[in-house]
Amino acid sequence: MSEHDTYQTPLSSRYASKEMAHLFSAENRFHTWRKLWLTLAMAEKQLGLPIPDAAIDEMKQNLHLDAEQFETAAVEEKKRRHDVMAHVHTFGTVAPAAAGIIHLGATSCYVTECQRGPYLPSHRPDLVFQKLAVYRDLPTLGFTHFQPAQLTTVGKRATLWLQELLWDLRNIKRARDDLGFRGVKGTTGTQASFLALFDGDHDKVEELDRLVTEMSGFSYAYPVTSQTYSRKIDIDVLAPLASFGATAHKIATDLRLLAHLKEVEEPFESTQIGSSAMAYKRNPMRSERICSLARHLMTLHQNALGTASVQWFERTLDDSANRRVTLPEAFLAADIVLTTLQNVSEGLVVYPRVIARRIAQELPFMATENIIMALVKKGGDRQEAHEKIRVLSHEAAHQVKQLGLDNDLMERVRSDTYFDPIKDELDALLDPRSFIGRAPQQVDKFLNEWVTPALADSELKAAVEKGDKAELSV
């Protein structure tokens, strides 16, 4: 049966990066189990258990599974209804000297739960930051309630997106760095099996836990566990991923709305087809994909909350099937959303003339307060000026809304002798850059005080140097 004859999740077969897809592959999963069994055996031997050198050597030489071993494990699991014991048996067939000591003193959760969590993907945030600097002072119409509001700049709007991404980076790093190791705790967390192995020597049991934790690359083990580590750990791990999903959804939604306004567009290849029927269309399919998968990512956190809340006493197995789906899908979805978001940001196209035209339609109304203040400075009456502007504004609004014509408020102002004292100031009063406040300076300060230090972090710097532009397979 080929891969085309069975269902495959599109998360891995269609969208995810090769690196993330491999991280949750069967090969990597069972390779990790074997490394954990090897680590346990080496630590037990170091503390005095009679484990032969040949057992260690054979385990080291057989950490990866071949196709025949996968088939053996599948047959064993169907017979035993237990995946861990199926792989204990399979490992023993290729490392016969170790067959009797593989998994010694451990419970299944030793291998299923003592694995690494979040990692930092190698993406290129610096490519996004460069665009902020370019458009730091390009005025654009702001929107509240998706209704025209005061002006901002293209760069300032993007800093709002980027600030949330920096928070997401912080949260993901916190969750990863806070991860502990379940360690060697036994069937209900009491370490009774290991205490028996070491003839009641509590110090050796504690040293075993410390050794295995250290050899597995963790800085500490959870001080107490039941059969499993607390499922609240899954909540803590998925929370920042779900939060990132919310950030990405907001950014992609803004980009979809801007695409509708024809002010900003995501990349669109020359051979790309927007619609099978409407050949002219340029649908924001990348941003729509981000929203689609980000919603899925956000809902997965609820699974972790539900699972943690229903664990009875030392453990129930109703977490297992759920976690097999939830945890990989969360990381795969986050990886896809992040890669797609990077691809979009790298190829964003800004249309300054369209932006300027929209500003020209709305700015005359926004400038009315400035016109009134200018008249007052020249000795005019504030209430009288307000009434004059009010009448002309309603006439101009009628032209726009009822007749579908351009906003001609400024032409009406220029033709009215009442405004003669300030007519030579109108161009200055209508300069869009006079309406953007400190937006350019805010962009500069944000880049200098927040973005640059973030990029200077050694780990992130290494990821940026390793990364490249994001390419989508579809």
Image (spheres, rainbow, N blue to C red):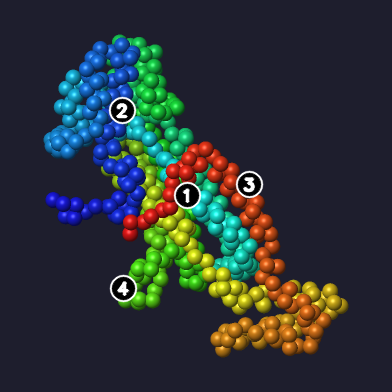
Of labels 2 and 1, earlier in sequence is: 2
Please count the marks in the image.
Answer: 4
Dot label at residue 124: 1
Asked which secondary structure carries label 2, the reply is: helix
Residue, disc 4 = 276
Q: Position of residue 159 (x, y in %)?
A: 57, 55
State the separation of the CA atoms marked 1 and 3.
Answer: 19 Å
Which of marks 4 and 1 precedes in the sequence?
1
Query: Which badge, 3 or 4, comes first in the chain's sequence?
Result: 4
**Label whose residue precedes the other's in the sequence (1 or 3):** 1
At label 4, counting other C-alpha atoms closer than 10 Å, the crowd grade (few under 14, some 14-19, many 20 or more) is: few
> Does residue 106 appear anywhere in the picture?
no
Callout 2: few (<14), some (14-19), or many (20+) C-alpha neighbours within 10 Å?
many
Instruction: Assess whether mark 4 and mark 1 are in contact (beta carbons under 8 angstroms).
Output: no
- As shown in the figure, which amino acid type bears the numbered disc 2? Leu
Q: Residue at x 47, y 49 (%)?
A: 124
Whether residue 315 is situated above or below residue 424 in the rendered picture: above
**SS for tag 4?**
loop
Residue found at x 78% / y 83% = 419
Q: Tell me the kind of residue under disc 3.
A: Glu
Q: Residue at point 45% right, 37% down?
A: 176
The answer to the question of whether label 4 and label 2 lie on touching residues, with beta carbons closer than 8 A, is no
In three-dimensional space, the C-alpha distance between marks 4 and 2, rounded to whole angstroms, equals 52 Å
Would you identify the image quadrant in which residue 369 lies? bottom right
Task: Tell me which amino acid carries mark 4.
Answer: Ser
**Numbered badge on residue 43:** none
Cα separation between marks 3 and 4: 47 Å
Based on the displayed image, in which of its 4 quarters is residue 441 positioned? bottom right
Q: Which residue is denoted by mark 3 in the rendering? A: 449
Q: Earlier in the sequence, mark 3 or mark 2?
A: 2
- Alpha-carbon span between mark 3 and mark 2: 43 Å
